[in-house]
Amino acid sequence: MSEASEQIAVIEYCALRRIDVFAVPNGGKRNALEAHNLKRQGVKAGVPDLMIPIAKGGYHGLFIEMKVGRNKPTDKQKEWLERLSRNGYKAVVCYGADAAIDTIEEYMGIGGK
């Protein structure tokens, strides 16, 4: 499974459970002009892939950085996860859709897929 397909599974799960979630479009290959324009529009390297903008359990919201296989968070991703955590968000790395869904269910206080 690719990171993209795992993320799609998480988005589909959230849609079924009616959990507000959105993806942060920071990844992917872009040409120099498009990358420059996106940077000017506020796209930031390292921002986690998914955000659930729902306050729960003393957090302002949940950010998830999706990974698969042996992929590890980059230094910029680690910096963002730490920054978000310091500012009252739950910010985690999840390896695959199952781990992300488990994290979401725990965060939301729900059980079962």
Image (cartoon, helix red, strand yellow):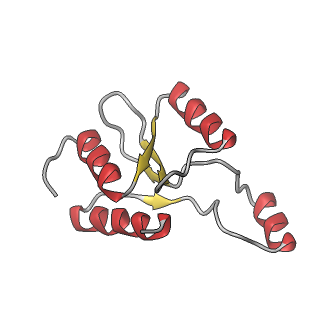
Which of 24/72 is in front?
Answer: 72
In the displayed structure image, the side of residue 96 where residue 47 appears, left or right? right
With respect to residue 96, does 56 lie above or below?
A: above
With respect to residue 91, does 113 lie above or below?
A: below
In the displayed structure image, the side of residue 21 where residue 36 appears, left or right? right
Residue at the outermost left position: 112
Residue 110: horizontal and vertical position, in percent? Answer: 17, 46
Quadrant housing residue 21? bottom left
Residue 102: horizontal and vertical position, in percent? Answer: 26, 47
With respect to residue 81, does 42 lie above or below?
A: below
Residue 12: horizontal and vertical position, in percent? Answer: 32, 69
Screen quadrant of the C terminus: bottom left
In the displayed structure image, the side of residue 97 where residue 87 appears, left or right? right
Residue 43: horizontal and vertical position, in percent? Answer: 70, 56
> Total of numbered circles in the picture?
0
Screen quadrant of the N terminus: bottom left
Please name the residue shown 46% across and 60% down the image. 22
Please name the residue shown 52% across and 55% down the image. 49
Please name the residue shown 57% across and 30% down the image. 82
Please name the residue shown 61% across and 48% down the image. 47
